[in-house]
């Protein structure tokens, strides 16, 4: 094989011929220099860790995250591509300190370099803790933690749905305590994964499905204890949204008493453990039955006492009540007296009226109206004759006046003028013509005579 020539050093100050003799200083193009710098930097810094504070954060719709890492003396452009950004548990924000793992890359068109990150981790608190606080702050700002939106749990639910792993200890502890406290209480198990890559989506779908089941009155999201990473599915936003949107009251029973998740804040009630959730939802049946027995006895005693008081009250009322037959007899006697008094008053009033009528008849007889009637008839005849004479006189006067007015009207009537051979001419609109200037040759006119009318056309105007 032919021997390969050694690479040219990046700091070459000139050019050499085949015999190693320098022929003069080398002149770089911008592209050549940038390419050699790229080879040096990218070959030297293949994998490194850089610590700094985030500023100038940009998150376009492409899903990539562009930012600057800075300290007190310098700054470095960095990028986290979409694939790596999707894996982040927390949200990158301006002002937080990060340790970024990645490589240096030179962008030749601009001659600049940047850190291409494979992953970023917050300085101080862990990524999961920061993600927890960020989501908590976001949901709290939306009001999902408010007490006003929390619903009361049913006293004794007819059916309970529990969203959990069917093989975990949580469901067995829940069922054991629940059926020990209230045997036979129906439970619907909605099987989901509670840990792993897609566990949060499964839990959210399980909560939605449980909320739609017939007869279910409360939904429990449960899981046993574990580390923060193990419980992380219950800190995902999709689970929080599903709990908030569930149409039924919800209970979060995740981990142990010291474990707190986002689901605990959003759910209507929090139980420290799945066992505590069973105690929260199911009262002890024996205690309920004993309490019902005590309430039944108190109700019977109260009812008995009430009946006895009413019976005593009835006896007292009966003692005050007289014999109804005697009351009826008294009412009959009183009615007879009232009827007799009414009859006596009626007869007395009738006698009084008859007496007054007799007196009026005698007075009327003494002043018989026959004579007055004859006098009034004679007076009426005289007035009738007088009225007839006045009427004839007034009629003659009205006739004479009418005839005079009729003569004057006839003398002034235009018909008398037309009878002497005159006529009246009207234009097409029915207006009487008083001047030849009102028409022009060819216009149609109407001529009114003493007897009849003529339609004519103007031939000439003078």
Image (tube, rainbow, N blue to C red):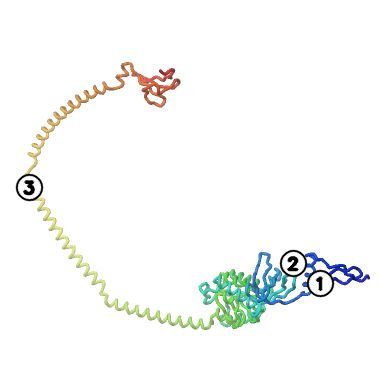
Q: Position of residue 65 (x, y in %)?
A: 68, 69
Residue 218 quadrant: bottom right
| Mark 3 in CB contact with mark 1 (< 8 angstroms) | no
Q: Circle 2 sits on which residue?
A: 111
The kind of secondary structure element at disc 3 is: helix
Q: Position of residue 431 (x, y in %)?
A: 38, 26
Q: Which residue is mark 1?
A: 11
Tell me, for residue 326, which label it has, or none.
none
Q: Is mark 1 in CB contact (under 8 Å) with mark 2?
A: no
Give me the residue at 74% from left, 76% from top: 48
Where disc 1 sits, the SS reads: loop
Residue at (19, 65) in percent of width and height: 336
For the N terminus, which image quadrant?
bottom right
Residue hosting label 3? 363
Instruction: Please tell me which residue is depicted at 10% across the width and 37% down the height of the picture.
Output: 376
Gap between marks 3 and 2, in whole Å? 147 Å
């Amino acid at each position: 094989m032919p021997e390969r020539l050694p690479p040219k050093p990046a700091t070459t100050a000139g050019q050499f011929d085949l015999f190693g003799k320098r022929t003069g200083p080398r002149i770089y193009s911008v592209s050549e220099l940038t390419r050699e710098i790229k080879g040096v930097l990218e070959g030297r810094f293949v994998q490194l860790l850089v610590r700094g504070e985030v500023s100038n954060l940009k998150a376009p719709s492409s899903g990539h995250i562009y930012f600057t890492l800075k300290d007190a003396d310098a700054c470095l452009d960095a990028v986290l591509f979409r694939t790596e950004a999707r894996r982040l548990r927390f949200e990158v924000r301006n002002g937080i300190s990060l340790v970024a793992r990645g490589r240096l890359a030179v962008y030749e068109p601009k001659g600049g370099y940047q850190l291409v990150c494979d992953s970023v981790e917050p300085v101080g608190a862990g990524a999961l803790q920061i993600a927890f606080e960020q989501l908590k702050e976001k949901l709290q700002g939306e009001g999902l933690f408010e007490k006003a939106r929390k619903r009361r749990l049913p006293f004794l639910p007819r059916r309970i749905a529990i969203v959990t792993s069917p093989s975990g200890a949580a469901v067995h502890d829940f069922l054991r305590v629940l059926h020990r406290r209230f045997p036979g209480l129906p439970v619907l198990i909605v099987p989901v994964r509670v840990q792993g890559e897609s566990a949060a989506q499964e839990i959210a779908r399980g909560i939605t499905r449980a909320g739609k089941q017939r007869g279910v009155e409360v939904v429990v999201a449960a899981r046993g204890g574990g580390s923060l990473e193990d419980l992380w599915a219950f800190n995902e936003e999709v689970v929080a949204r599903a709990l908030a949107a569930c149409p039924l009251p919800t209970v979060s029973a995740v981990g142990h008493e010291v474990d707190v998740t986002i689901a605990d804040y959003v759910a209507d009630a929090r139980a420290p453990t799945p066992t505590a959730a069973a105690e929260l939802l199911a009262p002890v049946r024996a205690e309920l039955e004993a309490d019902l027995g005590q309430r039944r006895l108190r109700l019977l005693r109260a009812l008995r006492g009430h009946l006895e008081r009413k019976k005593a009250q009835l006896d007292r009322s009966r003692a005050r009540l007289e014999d109804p037959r005697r009351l009826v007899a008294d009412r009959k006697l009183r009615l007879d007296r009232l009827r007799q008094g009414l009859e006596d008053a009626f007869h007395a009033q009738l006698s009084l009226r008859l007496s007054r009528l007799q007196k009026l008849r005698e007075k009327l007889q003494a002043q018989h109206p026959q004579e007055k009637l004859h006098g009034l008839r004679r007076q009426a005849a005289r007035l009738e004759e007088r009225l007839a004479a006045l009427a004839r006189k007034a009629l003659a006067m009205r006739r004479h006046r009418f005839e005079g007015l009729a003569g004057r009207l006839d003398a002034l009537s235009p018909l008398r003028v037309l009878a002497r051979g005159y006529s009246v001419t009207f234009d097409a609109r029915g207006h009487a013509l008083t001047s030849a200037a009102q028409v022009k040759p060819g216009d149609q006119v109407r001529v009114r005579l003493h007897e009849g009318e003529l339609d004519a056309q103007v031939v000439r105007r003078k």
